[in-house]
Image (tube, rainbow, N blue to C red):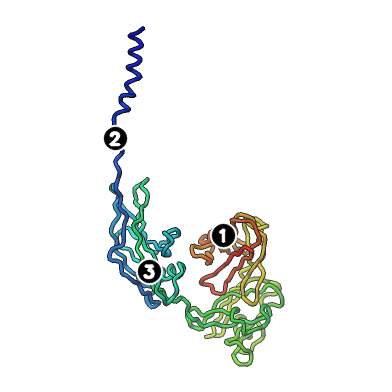
Amino acid sequence: MKVFSKLLFVVFALPLIWSCEPLEQPRIIEQTGATLSGVPSNLVLSIDDADDFIVFNLNSADFGVSVSETTYEIQVDAVGNNFAAPVGIGSSTTTTVEVKVDDLNRRAIAKGLVAGEPGNLEFRVNATPSRTGLPAITGEGVSISVTPYSTEVELPFLRVPGEYQGWNPDNDNTIIYSESSDDVYEGFVHILSGSGAFKFITGPAWDEFPDFGRGDAAGTLVEKGADLLIPQNQYGTYSVKVDLNDLTYELERVGIWGIIGDATPGGWDTETPMTFDRDENILKITIDLVPGAFKFRTQTWDMNYGMSSEEGVAGFNNDGADIPIAEAGNYTITFDLKTPWEIRYSVTKN
């Protein structure tokens, strides 16, 4: 029995003896993030170079292990924000990254820089390896002075007075633009009630500028012509195209805009229609919402807008994500189609 007890003691004591030996620590893999190389101290951007590219050279990242490919993305954020909200401005699988001037300009203004004035942005490189399970690493940030340019370009425009906005040619909001400055104007009009009558005029006063109305042939215009009309009782938002070179116009009904989603009273099945603010030429609605999301729609998913990657700019169809509502409450929502190339929206909790 004593022999058996001694054997048990030895069996149980062996792990205790081994546990006293120093354990081998796992090897720490040193990693080094990618950094910008030969960075300019300041970048002065010009609208004349909007479609050109700025070339950034990088020092490559070292993941401590072999990777077949690395994607490098240059990110920017406001100074002092500690990259809490970084945005990418260009990427590459080489250590040379091209950044479009216009993209950097838009990001700089979105981060609070003022057009025509130098201001600092933080730049860094995010490196993502192709090897599965290996996380991305970021390099040290560097501050660079950036002077953005103004994106506000004065485009020719045509005024669209009508019953829908009080027959006021002096309303600077009810206008359509010639984006190519070629006397071809495009935009939207919102006619949600009344006779649906409107005209086109080149200036803010009836007696001082040429106005254009209905010609004898369908789709034609004539100076001092009769009022243009939408089809009877076919209210809604209309896409308008006017060519003053040959005095023609096109009118196409888009539909009646509303908001739809599980944040709205109608859920994802029924839109809640928006109303028209004729002074601002925007669609708006003040409504009680619950936590969830919504989009803008015109009775069909073929025509809907949601949230894009740029704050306040709407994304069309699949490019527009659901717009989130975090808290229940009363909200005022606007939908602005004055500039067709950049449709905007706002969501304000009252």
Give the vertical position of 170 relative to 60 (above or below): below
Residue at which label 1 appears = 323
Is 205 or 24 nearer to us in this picture?
24
Q: Estimate the x, y position of residue 292 in percent, counting from the top left.
A: 60, 54
Residue plotted at (32% across, 58% down): 93
Q: Estimate the x, y position of residue 225 in percent, counting from the top left.
A: 64, 87
Q: In the figure, residue 229 lies in which quadrant?
A: bottom right
**Which disc is residue 290 wearing?**
none
Q: Amino acid at mark 2?
A: Glu
Q: CA distance from mark 2 to mark 1?
A: 52 Å
Residue at which label 3 appears = 100
Within 10 Å of disc 3 (Cα), the crowding (few <14, some 14-19, many 20+) is some
Give the vertical position of 42 relative to 324 (above or below): below
Q: Taking 293 as reference, is 104 left or right?
A: left
Marks 1 & 3, CB-CB < 8 Å contact: no
Residue plotted at (33% across, 12% down): 6
Residue plotted at (49% across, 78% down): 179
Q: Amino acid at mark 3?
A: Lys
Residue plotted at (41% across, 61% down): 88
Q: Estimate the x, y position of residue 154 in percent, counting from the top left.
A: 49, 81
Give the vertical position of 188 relative to 85 (above or below): below
Identify the secondary structure beneath mark 3.
strand
**Labels 1 and 3: the sequence-earlier one:** 3
Residue at which label 2 appears = 24
Quarter of the N terminus within the rendering: top left
